Image: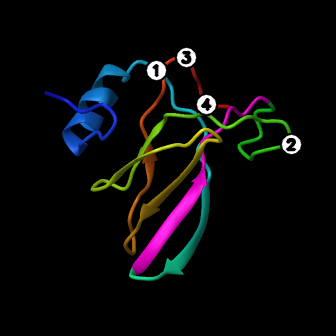
Amino acid sequence: MEDLAHPTRRDVVKGGLAAAGVAAITSPIGRVFAAEGGTTVSGFVFEDAGGTGKRSAGERGIAGVTVSNGRDVAMTDAEGRYELPIEEAAIIFVIKPTGYAPP
């Protein structure tokens, strides 16, 4: 049985396939910094109302969006923030939520 509160990589792939017809939202990557025990990346997933590709004042974060580094999975919090461990040359990607399109 799937635990939707703690999706696995398999759940993410299934979600990505289900949303293949929906365009992705903008997900700018935040700063990358060394953390105790490794390196992490943090950022926001937000509604890019201005279409600039950058978060502007008043653009709300989107909660509950799945973000992955290809191994680990995180869900954005109520403000659209996420944080993931990252290795050199890793790619961070967003599982496209229904109803959003790129700017």
Q: Check disc 1 and give the amino acid type.
A: Val
Colouring scheme, one of rainbow, by chain, secondary structure, one colour: rainbow
Query: Which residue matches tag 2?
Result: 57
Disc 4 element = loop
User: Residue 43, relative to residue 87: is it above or below?
Assistant: above
Q: Going from the N terminus, do you reach mark 2 or mark 1 first? A: 1
Magenta segment: 38-49
Q: In the rendered structure, which disc, 1 or 3, sits on the residue that comes first in sequence?
A: 1
Marked residue nearer the N-terminal end (4 or 1):
1
Number of residues whose C-alpha sits closer than 10 Å to that of mark 1, classed few (under 14), some (14–19) or many (20 or more): some
Question: Where residue 24 sits: x, y (%)?
Answer: 51, 31
Q: Residue 60 or 49: which is nearer the viewer?
A: 60
* Mark carried by residue 9: none
Q: Amino acid at mark 3?
A: Gly
Q: Which residue is mark 1?
A: 22
Structural distance between the alpha carbons of marks 1 and 3: 7 Å
Identify the amino acid type marked 2.
Ala
Which residue lies at the image location 73% right of the left edge and 34% below the top edge?
Answer: 60
Q: Describe the element under mark 3 as helix, strand or loop.
A: loop
Give the residue type at disc 4: Pro
Residue 99, disc: 3
Question: How far apart are labels 4 and 1 at the CA level?
Answer: 10 Å
Q: Residues within 10 Å of mark 4 (few under 14, many from 20)?
A: some
Q: Position of residue 31 (x, y in %)?
A: 62, 68
Whole-percent x, y for residue 100 in the image: 58, 22
Disc 3: CA contacts within 10 A as few (<14), some (14-19) or many (>=20): few
Placement of 32 over or under 22, stated as above or below:
below
Residues at discs 1 and 3 in contact (Cβ within 8 Å):
yes
Residue at mark 2 to residue at mark 3: CA–CA distance: 22 Å
Q: Nearer the viewer, residue 61 or 54?
A: 61
* Secondary-structure class at tag 1: loop
Circle 4 is placed at which residue position? 102
